[in-house]
Amino acid sequence: MPKPHQHDLDLNPPSKAGMRSRLWICSTALALPLPACATAEEVPPPAATPSAPVATRSPAGDPGPAVETPAPEPTLTFKNSRDLAILLEGPATGRSVGRFASRNEGVAVEFDAHVVAVTGSTVRLEYGDHDAARRTGPVFELRDVAPAVLGIEGELAEDDDVRLVARVTSYESESRLLLLDPVSLTRRS
């Protein structure tokens, strides 16, 4: 008779030792309900998390070994990041802005902003719409920005409302600017 596969249903009653190991796994594994319990041989490996490395094959179908590349980190938004929401609704300067920048260096953020100033290839932005009655959050600066590279038609101008996706670079306390490296910038109406 062929050996049953691991996923086949075992209709034979387990031995007392098998029952003990099944109960032990059930009682120690995150308090799973009894029907979801399994013996040590049946326990599947843990699911991959978004921050776990991902194995990929070499490009062009090369039969070379798999290469591990880190999975992309999620982009922080007002809705999914309490820290970003506090930054955007908080003071324009101070230690909290510096702490945010140092904790999130290299992390992508996405939010609505408006252009405050454009000087050559430098763009300064503030959170929210240009006609908002109340200003909150720090002044952001993008350096070495080429609108054509970001896919923006024409020149950016003061009071343009934009959707910004950028990576956090650093906070300059002397100039009171939170520096960002742009990923994409789109005009909003």
Image (cartoon, rainbow, N blue to C red):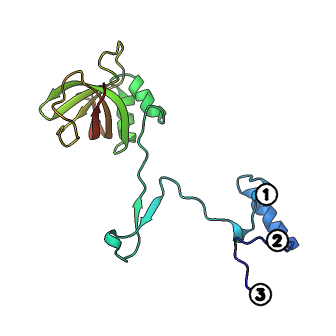
Query: Dot 1, how many residues are within 10 Å of its Cα: few (below 14), some (14-19), or many (20+)?
Result: few
Residue located farthest toward the left when viewing the structure as drawn: 120
Residue 21, image quadrant: bottom right
Q: Which of label 1 and label 2 is nearer to you? A: 1
Q: Amino acid at mark 1?
A: Pro
Residue shown at 41% from the left, 23% from the top: 89
Q: Amino acid at mark 3?
A: Met
Q: Earlier in the sequence, mark 1 or mark 2?
A: 2
Q: Name the secondary structure under disc 3.
A: loop
Front-lying residue, 31 or 172 = 31
Q: Which residue is mark 3?
A: 1
Query: Dot 2, how many residues are within 10 Å of its Cα: few (below 14), some (14-19), or many (20+)?
Result: some
- Marks 2 and 3, Cα distance to the nearest angstrom? 23 Å
- Marks 1 and 2, Cα distance to the nearest angstrom? 15 Å
Quadrant showing the C terminus:
top left
Q: Name the secondary structure under disc 1.
A: helix
Q: Is residue 146 above or below residue 23?
A: above
Residue located farthest toward the top when viewing the structure as drawn: 133
Residue 176 visible in image? no
Residue located farthest toward the bottom when viewing the structure as drawn: 1
Residue shown at 70% from the left, 70% from the top: 7
Q: Is residue 126 above or below residue 75?
A: above
Residue shown at 73% from the left, 85% from the top: 2
Q: Earlier in the sequence, mark 3 or mark 1?
A: 3
Q: Position of residue 104 (x, y in %)?
A: 38, 41
Residue 178 visible in image? yes
Front-lying residue, 25 or 166 = 166
Q: Which residue is mark 2?
A: 18
Q: Is residue 184 above or below residue 4?
A: above
Residue 176, image quadrant: top left
Q: Which residue is mark 1?
A: 35
Q: Position of residue 125 (x, y in %)?
A: 26, 27
